[in-house]
Image: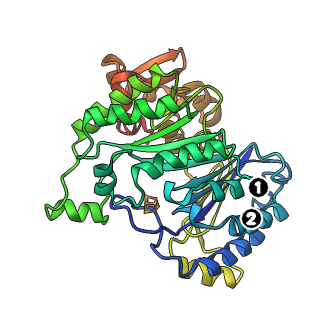
Amino acid sequence: MAGIYIHIPFCRQPCHYCNFHFMASTRDKDAYLQALLREIDLQRMFFDRQGHGSTFGRIKTVYVGGGTPSMLSARELSRLFEGLSQHFSLEGATEVTLEANPDDLNPGKLKELRQLPVNRLSIGVQSFFPEDLYYMNRIHSPSQAWNSIQDAREAGFENISVDLIYGTPTLTDANWEDNLHRLAMTGIPHISAYALTVEPRTPLAYLIRKGKAKPVSEEQSARQFSMMKDVLESYGYRHYEISNFSFPGKESLHNMGYWTGQPYLGLGSSAHSFIPGKRSWNISNISQYKAAIYEDAVPAEEEVLSLSQAVNEYIMTSLRTVWGCDLGYIARLWGPQHIPALKKRAEGHLRRGALIWKNDHTLVLGRKGLFFADGIAADLFID
Ligand code: SF4
């Protein structure tokens, strides 16, 4: 199984918390799409070159993310998929996701999107309350958010995911519960929810430093994380990854590929690729990306993972999921010598219920550990 990620680095306006690679202008859009098509051509042998066999029939998931891919017209997206299908067989692709913002989705556009290979929408709602959207500098309104979900379903999209953000200083606990209940009541099959984090060099970090925006409280985030788990599980959603809930069988297959070490090819500026043992990433600069691609060179850096990096990456990603960190798998793949030290490091977390044994060889996060997954994983890392 392999995946393809395509990065569309354009947005209408910068959300204050965002540290993704994007530009708030579309002046380079046409040239960028040309470059992207050229990169698809240049990378057509990516999986074969890496010794992972022909890609024919092996692409299981495609994810068009950003940025804001829904800013592209259906015609532009269609060109992209045509370019992709000239070199990669998408016939076996079971999940083709398009990230979309509510302000781009209307019945007409959705009808056009239905004609494309896209069969899953990931809609960036973040909140249904105007004060939160304002705090985050999101461009859409609450009514656009609701309409986008309804219109998507009416257009025939069944596989829909909605992104939410909690821990926003303007988000009261009551409003957070309201967001969750009302969204769950729509019955959409997948919800991703992230704690608002203040990344350095973002407008939010600047505004908080200058006292122009309220600071973010970890205590509020932890509390709202716990509320979210209770509310969504009461509607039958499974908390299958720290930030992801779904109805059974509606997990994000593309992200599952990331978490289970499947190979993937990233196309576009800043896109990451992975083949077991090696990862690479394209330059995060649209002009330099285009210039290199026009010279028929993919501007990527690569890193061969050391044994400890590979093991630690597995610990980090697996522990975030309900399937947990399988020490038997680590022993089989990287050697049994790592297990005693790993078990020793887990002891403290096991004692206080942050980690629990799922069976005699698999560690999973306990309720007390869920909000601190990354820190706990780091404590288990091998040297
Ligand atoms: S729409 Fe997404 S990528 Fe664009 S600025 Fe907002 S959070 Fe960042």
Task: Judge: label 1 CB < 8 Å from ligand 1.
Answer: no
Q: Amino acid at mark 2?
A: Ser
Q: Confirm or deny contact between disc 1 and disc 2 (CB under 8 A).
A: yes
Closer to the camera in the image, 176 or 16: 176
Disc on the earlier residue, 1 or 2: 2
SS class, disc 1: loop
Residue at the (66%, 79%) spot, across then down: 293
- Residue at (32% x, 64% y) in the render: 202
Q: Residue furthest top?
A: 360
Hey, which quadrant is residue 250 in on the image?
top right
Callout 2: CB less than 8 Å from ligand 1: no
Q: Position of residue 353 (x, y in %)?
A: 34, 18
Does residue 207 appear to the left or right of 96 in the view shown?
A: left
The amino acid type of the residue labelled 1 equals Gln
Q: Is residue 207 left or right of residue 275?
A: left
Q: What percent of the width, then of the height, locates residue 42?
A: 75, 72
- Image coords of residue 182 (percent x, y): 43, 33
At mark 2, the secondary structure is helix
Q: Which mark is residue 78?
A: 2
| Structural distance between the alpha carbons of marks 1 and 2 | 9 Å
Q: Is residue 261 above or below residue 274?
A: above
Q: Give the vertical position of 300 relative to 328 (above or below).
A: below
- Can residue 338 be seen? no
Q: Considering depth in this image, is 292 or 248 the residue closer to the camera?
A: 248
Which residue appears farthest toward the left when viewing the image? Answer: 211
Q: Is residue 107 visible?
A: yes
The front one of 181 and 69 is 181
To which quarter of the image does residue 287 belong?
bottom right
Where is mark 1, residue-wise?
Answer: 115
